[in-house]
Image (cartoon, coloured by chain):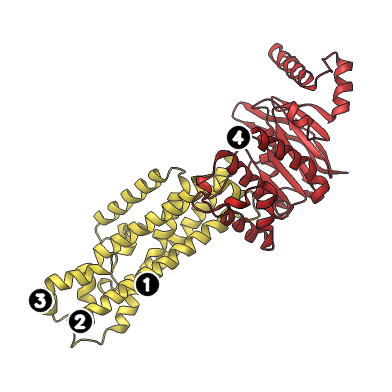
Chain colours: A yellow, B red
Amino acid sequence: MAALVPVINMAVRHEIYTGSGASPVNILFDANWQLMAMLNVLLVVMCACIIYNSEYADNAIQKMRMLPVHESGMYFGKSALIILMCMTVLLIEACGVVFCIDYWFKGNRGDWDLLFKSFVYEMVLIIPAVLFSLFIASAFKNMWTALGTGVVCVFMATMLPAGNFLLSLFPFAMPFQIFTNTKADNISNFIIAAVIESVVIIIMEFLLIKIRRLSE
Amino acid sequence: MNIIETRNLTKTYAGFTAVSGINLHIPKGAVYGFLGPNGAGKSTTMKMFLGLVKPTSGSFVIDGMSYPENRTEILKRTGSFIESPAFYGNLTGEENLDIIRKILGLPRETVDEALEITGIAQYKKRLAKKYSLGMKQRLGLASALIGKPPILILDEPTNGLDPSGIHETRALIRSLPQRFNCTVLVSSHMLSEIELMADSIGILNHGRLLFEGTLDDLRRNAALQGYPSDHLEDTFLAMVEEDNRQLKSGV
C-alpha cells in the first residue's frame, strides 16, 4: 500500500512536482515519505503483535519454553523475520519510486545511487522500530494491549518535530527521517543511534525474559 | 537407580510456600505417580524440573544433570505436558509436531508415530484450534511423546478426556516404560487413577511430601499409622485430612 502512495500522488498532482528542478528522489521522498513511513511502522507493529499473539493465544509459548530453545533466540528469530519483511516492503516501495521516476521524470534518470542509499538508510532506521515493537508485543499477553501501545507510539512519533535530533531518536520516529533531507553529519549520527538503540532494546528484552522467569 | 532426585526443593512466592523442601526419588524405568489435591504443588514441582519456574532453594538432578547448567540437555531428554495443552492454534496438529521435531532434530517419521500413538492421526491436517478438548489433550500428549524421550513429565494428562480416552491414556502411560524404555512422572489428584498406572507414588499436600514409596508401602504405612488401608483412596484422603488438621493446629 505504501508503494502506491507516490504513484497515486504523482498520478493526481504530477504537474506540481515535475516542474521543480530538484532531484526526483528528493521530490518523491519529500512529498510521500511521511505517509509511507507511517504505513511501514504500523505494519511492523501489527506484524509483531500477530506473531506474539499466535504464541500467547493457545499457550504455545509455554511449550516453546519447555523445549531446548532459548526465548531470546526466539525473539531474534522473530526480529529476523520482520526485518526480512521490511526489506521486501522497502524493495516494493523502491519499485514504486522507480516507476514514478521513470514515468513522470523521463529526462532525469541519474539518481539511482541516491535512491539506493535512501532505501538502505530507511532500512537501517526501521530496525529499532522492529525490535521495539517486538519488545512491546512480548511484554503483553493480550494482543490488543500491545497493539494499542504500539499504535499510540506510532502516532506520538508522527507528532514529534522531525528537526529535533533528540526527539527524532524515539525508535518509532526514526523511520520518518529522510536521507536526502538529512545533513551528512546527522546521517552517521542517526545510524550510530539506531545501532545503540537496537542494542539497548535487545538488553531490555533479555531483562524482561529474566524478570518474567524469576517472577513465575 | 533414580533418574530424578530432588534435595530440599523449595518454591516460595510472596507469603506463600508452594513447594516446601521436598526430597523426591524417582526410579529409572518406572511410572511415578505424583499425587496431591489441587494446589498441593505438583505442577510447580514439575515446572521447576522443566525450568519454567526457578526454585527458591534446594536443587534437583535429572539423569545425572543439574539445572540450570544442563538446561538444554535436560529439555532434549524430557517430553512434557504441563497443566493444559500448549500449541499453535493457527497450525495443524501435524505442523505443531513438526515444529517440535525440527527443534529436537528428530527424523520426519516421528511426527506420524506420535500422532498414531495418541490416536489423532486422522485429524493431523485439521487446525489445532478446531480440535475438541480431548483432541487438544491428545495433541499435548503427542508433543510430549514425540521422539520417545527417556523422561516424560505429564501433568494431569487425562483432564478433559472422555472415559474411553482416559482408559486408553492410562493404558498408554502404563505401557510406556516397556515400549519406549522411559521413565514417566505423572501427576493427578485422584489416587484411583494413579493406582492403575504407577509403580511408585509421592503424595504431596500444601507443598510438603507426605509419603513416598510403592503402593504396597503405602498400604503398610497406612495400617501402621491407623489410616484406613482397604481402599487407597480413603488412605489418601485420611492422610491429607490429618495433614490439614495438623497445619491448622500449628503442629
Q: Is residue B59 visible to the viewer in this orientation of the structure?
A: no
- Chain that bears disc 2: A
Q: Are marks 3 and 4 on the same chain?
A: no
Q: Which mark is residue A197?
A: none
The percent position of residue A14, horizontal first and vertical second, equals 13, 75
Q: Which residue is mark 3?
A: A15
Q: Earlier in the sequence, mark 3 or mark 1?
A: 3
Which of the two residues, B20 or A194, is positioned nearer the viewer here? B20
Q: Nearer the viewer, mark 3 or mark 2?
A: 2
Q: Nearer the viewer, mark 3 or mark 1?
A: 3
- Chain that bears disc 4: B
Please say if B67 is above or below B202. below
Query: Residue B147: which quarter of the image?
Result: bottom right
Q: Which mark is residue A103?
A: 2
Q: Are marks 3 and 2 on the same chain?
A: yes
Q: Which residue is mark 4?
A: B160
Specify few, some or many for label 4: CA neighbours under 10 Å numbering under 14, 14-19, or 20 or more: some
Q: Which residue is mark 1?
A: A188
C-alpha separation, residue under disc 3 versus residue under disc 2: 13 Å
Taking the spot 66% from the left edge, 45% from the top edge, the residue there is B141
The percent position of residue B36, horizontal first and vertical second, equals 71, 27
Which of the two residues, B64 or B240, is positioned nearer the viewer here? B240
Q: Nearer the viewer, mark 1 or mark 4?
A: 4
Q: Amino acid at mark 2?
A: Tyr
Q: Earlier in the sequence, mark 1 or mark 2?
A: 2
Q: Secondary structure at mark 3?
A: helix
Taking the spot 63% from the left edge, 61% from the top edge, the residue there is B102
Query: Residue B166: which quarter of the image?
Result: top right
Q: Earlier in the sequence, mark 3 or mark 2?
A: 3
Q: Nearer the viewer, mark 1 or mark 2?
A: 2
